[in-house]
Amino acid sequence: MTIKQGSIDQLCGLYSVLNATELLIGKYAPYDRRLRVSSQKKALFGELVAYLARNDLLEEALTVGIEDLYNRGGPIDIAIKSVKQYQGLKMKKQRAFSKAPKTLAEYWKTLTEHLRHDGTTVIICFSCRYFGHWTCVKAITPKELILVDSARMRRLYRNQCTIGPEDKNTYTLWPSLTYLLSIEHREADE
């Protein structure tokens, strides 16, 4: 049996940031051979890994995972700088909840309100059985979260989710680790 790339590392947090960024900007700026400028995707990945190394988090991130993406100067902020540098656009982040929602319906409503606007996405963290996972939500319906995910998950069904105590048969969504991202597009020239 072959061990596949990504099957034992825990870099889903970095990939959720990369996927969310690409959802917001369209496509990453490509490699420019004439200018010897690496692709934005590779440059951003390198900056994210360098951040982990500088903060002595690389071993932990590879073997256990990343605890939080929101901290000042952290992975989401690095992506914000990349978008400003390459696209000249303003990417914004905000915590989805200042206090924990009491019900899954409240959680769903907040994500629905955010995602109904163009230029938005959400990074969420959830746990299930014996693992935790970061992913990117590109759309939401009353019955499911539609994902862009490094582990190739496509959706989380609402009837299989909770924000309450962990249960081996459900996905526990973590409101305190739910981040709303958006992009301000340039105004069209008149």
Image: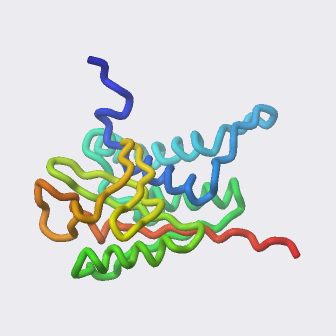
| Residue toward you, 4 or 42 | 4
Q: Which residue, as the protein is rendered here, is positioned at the far right?
A: 190
67 to 35, vertically: above or below: below
Q: Is residue 190 left or right of residue 88?
A: right
Q: Position of residue 168 (x, y in %)?
A: 11, 54
Q: Is residue 82 left or right of residue 67?
A: right
Q: Which residue, as the protein is rendered here, is positioned at the far top?
A: 1
Quadrant containing the N terminus in the rendered view: top left
| Residue toward you, 180 or 104 | 104
Report which quarter residue 90 is drawn in. bottom right
Q: Position of residue 13 (x, y in %)?
A: 38, 51
Q: Is residue 42 left or right of residue 189?
A: left
Q: Is residue 123 left or right of residue 163?
A: right
Q: Position of residue 97 (x, y in %)?
A: 35, 78
Task: Name the residue rendered at 22%, 70% in the picture.
Answer: 163
Task: Name the residue rendered at 55%, 70% in the picture.
Answer: 92
Number of numbered discs overlaid on the protein picture: 0
Way the structure is coloured: rainbow
Q: Position of residue 159 (x, y in %)?
A: 23, 64
Report which quarter residue 4 is drawn in. top left
Quadrant containing the C terminus in the rendered view: bottom right
Task: Name the residue rendered at 35%, 62% in the picture.
Answer: 144
Task: Name the residue rendered at 54%, 67% in the picture.
Answer: 120
| Residue toward you, 46 or 189 | 189
